[in-house]
Image (cartoon, rainbow, N blue to C red):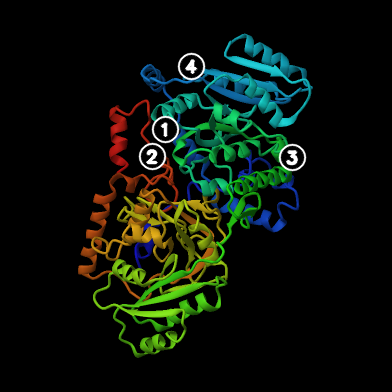
Amino acid sequence: MAALHRRGKAMLSRGGRLIRRMTLRVLFHTNGRPRGYVRRMFPSAFSSRTAALAEEQRRSIAPSSRSYGKWVKRHDTLSAADREAIRAHLAQLPYQPLISVIVPTYNTPATVLREMVESVKAQLYPNWELCIADDASPEPHVAALLAELAAGDPRVKWVQRKSNGHISAASNSALELASGAFVALLDHDDLLAEHALYEVAVELNAHPDAEIVYSDEDKIDEKGERYDPYFKPDYSYEQLLGQNVINHLGVYRRDSVIAVGGFRLGLEGSQDYDLALRIVHRCAPEQIRHIPAILYHWRQSPNGSSFSQEQLERCIVAARAAIQERLDETGTRAVVAVNPAVPVWHRVTWAIPTPAPLVSILIPTRDRAGLVRQCVDGILDRTDYPHVEILIIDNGSVEPESFALFEELKKDARIRVLRVEGEFNYSALNNAAAREARGDVLLLLNNDIDVIGPHWLGELVGLVMRPDIGIAGAKLLYADNRVQHAGVRLGMGTFDGGDGIAGHVGHFETRQEVGYFGQLALTRDVSAVTGACLAVRREIYEALGGLDEVNLKVAFNDVDFCLRVREAGYRVVWTPFAELHHYESVSRGPDSAPDKVERFNGEARYMRRRWGELLVNDPFHNPNFTNYTAELRLAFPPRRLRPWAMNTPEEKVVRVESR
């Protein structure tokens, strides 16, 4: 019912998977430095079974380097005209803060160290300083080269520590050299794109109160070839708790870095992650800005010699300790643990309030007694949540089996059956039941849902009872365990036979698939979830007037409601840790009759009028991906307007095509 699941097949890509990736070398986003091969992992952190799964994922969904190389050449390589346009734009920027690039270094090979410094010197944005702390490198070339590079440009500062203190101490030493309003974190062997700091400055002009700015990133090999891009979502607190999505490139307001005490000793390998978490918890979400552009090139060393490669287990432990400490400081009861899909990522379990709030489960149906019985049995007999009531909304059932079932179910004090006559209006049915509900949490649930494991409802309640979250949705699977729903993406299928309003993420993937950088394995913020299983606090549902029963009787009402909840200042989250089977509206049948088609088209037109450009600019779908298909494919050209060329004819074409 509700919104999207009847149109999924039409939105599937007709081509192969282009961008999703889970290679062994880049599984490890525990600390912003995910490097190393499985042979360098600690056995207790990464089992042979997990290694085999990771290798299978790498073979099946590794990105196409050829396609990315073509994309880089066409859309991410600056021309002379681009550089001229950037310099002209810089001349017009009213706010050009000094940005201090912080680099701790230790025994860095001379060529690599020089290339890192030269990438900063090549910045088109001129108001920077490079602050390098050599952590008492025993190799004499390091100090000699830093002295040479500093002598050639007064913006390059460096200090040599008297003793080796490791990366946190060295980062603090580099921070002491900084005088900029913002600090950008750069590894001693990585590279900045030449327009990186310019893009940061543009973002700071648009959002001068920003506390954190972060960008997309890719990797670069010893031959200088770029590959494996991470096109990130806009800021998602839930995803940050699962992996360090902020670095790289991470840029922080220096006063805030100083205020939280800089980089903490004892958290080496996860010191950047810890810093991001401490600053995130002291600023508003809108002060965390994402630049959807590849501004950081992360060098991959074939010998696997970085700290996080050699000390993986220590990095993971430090990351989880940092997350747990931040959660404890908020006063919430939550526990961070190993992510069962990828052990170097994290899973946070949020405690259910005491006493457990009553959950009112709203199940619309018309006949289909077998489905209803299965659904109710799963809730009452195979779910461990202690406090529920079930409201079955009977919308015109006529079969004797249905009436017999309803009479039987009503004998249970936890179940009520509400008879609602008239045409099928999903929004009105749920609104009518919500008015009769007694619970603090409302759970919209299709009659074709079946329980898999006992903890699903507690997972949803633990999320939705947090004051900043308005809605939580579940991972829904077909009977054959392929994914039916892993969140909703706005704009999906705009030019691929779909209506372009929205579609399901992860459609037809296997249950074990982790998705692009953990998209299917991490709890994360989304724009919407399906009404087939949607948990919301009753106070929010009532304040917003529930589902729109006038304009959206059948389709898109769940998407619209989620967008209104986000508009009201609450977050919508999806979790992979609440899994249910969904048999996808088998009780209603197809909507192919002419009157239903016209109704659907009218509801689509309403959504476009109501939500406009948001429907083609999902904040959690990177604009370097196309809206054309359900699968993640590179956009040729990107849907993002380049800040230095927004008024050029070429950019105006991009604006039109993105719609």
Relative vertical location of residue 389 with respect to residue 20 in this rendering, above or below: below
Q: Earlier in the sequence, mark 4 or mark 1?
A: 1
Tell me which residue sits at (45%, 49%) in the image: 632
Task: Say what secondary structure mark 4 lies in.
Answer: loop
Q: Amino acid at mark 3?
A: Glu
- Residue 446, by quadrant, is bottom left
Residue 126: give its label. 4
Q: Amino acid at mark 2?
A: Phe
Q: Earlier in the sequence, mark 3 or mark 1?
A: 1
Residue for badge 2: 636
Residue for badge 1: 74
Q: Decide: marks 2, 4 in contact (CB < 8 A)?
A: no
| Front: mark 3 or 1 | 3
Task: Say what secondary structure mark 2 lies in.
Answer: loop
Q: Earlier in the sequence, mark 3 or mark 4?
A: 4
Q: Amino acid at mark 1?
A: Arg
The N terminus sits in image quarter? bottom left
| Residue 312 x, y percent position in the rendering | 71, 43
| Residue 18 x, y percent position in the rendering | 48, 47
Q: Earlier in the sequence, mark 2 or mark 4?
A: 4
Q: Decide: marks 1, 2 in contact (CB < 8 A)?
A: yes
| Front: mark 3 or 2 | 3
